[in-house]
Amino acid sequence: MENVDERSATGLGSLMKRQVILCGVAVATALSICFAAPTPAKQAKSKKREATIVNMEKIVTEAFKNKQVETLKKYLAPEFVGLDAEGFKNVDAELAEVPKYDVRDNSFADMKLAFPSDNMAVVTYKATTQATHNGQDTSGTYNVASVWMKRERKWRLVFHTFMKSQ
């Protein structure tokens, strides 16, 4: 009889330990979910960052369209790399191309942003443009991707690709 009571007591203790552990895990999970949820302040900061990047992407596009090389110089990082159908270009080669383009219109669609880190933004979208390059029509829809890096409290464009959709 004594053995039965000891087994019952041991079984009850084991059951209570499991319940305490499960409750602890549930509380820890609930707390981590609560603290991981974005606060209104973080959401506002995120929206502001997104708006900043979108605005700069549009400023650079307009500066290219209006052949404002000095404005472009303010936004392109020294290590900038451009990629289009002609290949890779450094910042100097990209700026040398500006006068060769006549852009009449640009529109953006399906713009998406990702922030792999606090100091990096990746923007992807489709651009529809009406333009010529060295007198040849280059109008069409393009797949675009840009990478922006924040250094010394300023965002700079470090990579930009502009590839015509097939």
Image (cartoon, rainbow, N blue to C red):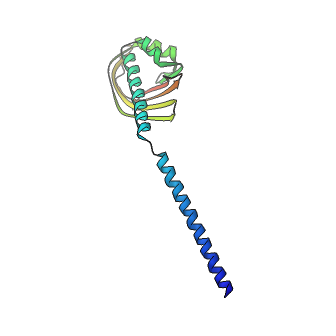
Residue 86: x percent and y percent? 48, 21
Residue 85: x percent and y percent? 46, 24
Residue found at x 48% / y 31%: 121
Residue found at x 68% / y 84%: 3
Residue found at x 49% / y 46%: 36
Residue 64: x percent and y percent? 40, 17
Q: Is residue 70 above or below residue 148?
A: above
| Nearer to us in this view, 84 or 2 | 2
| Residue 166, quarter of picture | top left
Q: In this view, does 1 lie above or below 60?
A: below
Q: Is residue 118 above or below residue 29?
A: above
Residue 68: x percent and y percent? 40, 12
Q: Is residue 156 left or right of residue 17?
A: left
Q: Is residue 15 left or right of residue 43?
A: right
Residue found at x 40% / y 35%: 44
The residue sitting at the bottom extreme is: 1
| Nearer to us in this view, 51 or 162 | 51
| Quadrant assignment for the N terminus | bottom right
Number of numbered labels in the structure image: 0
| Residue 131, quarter of picture | top left
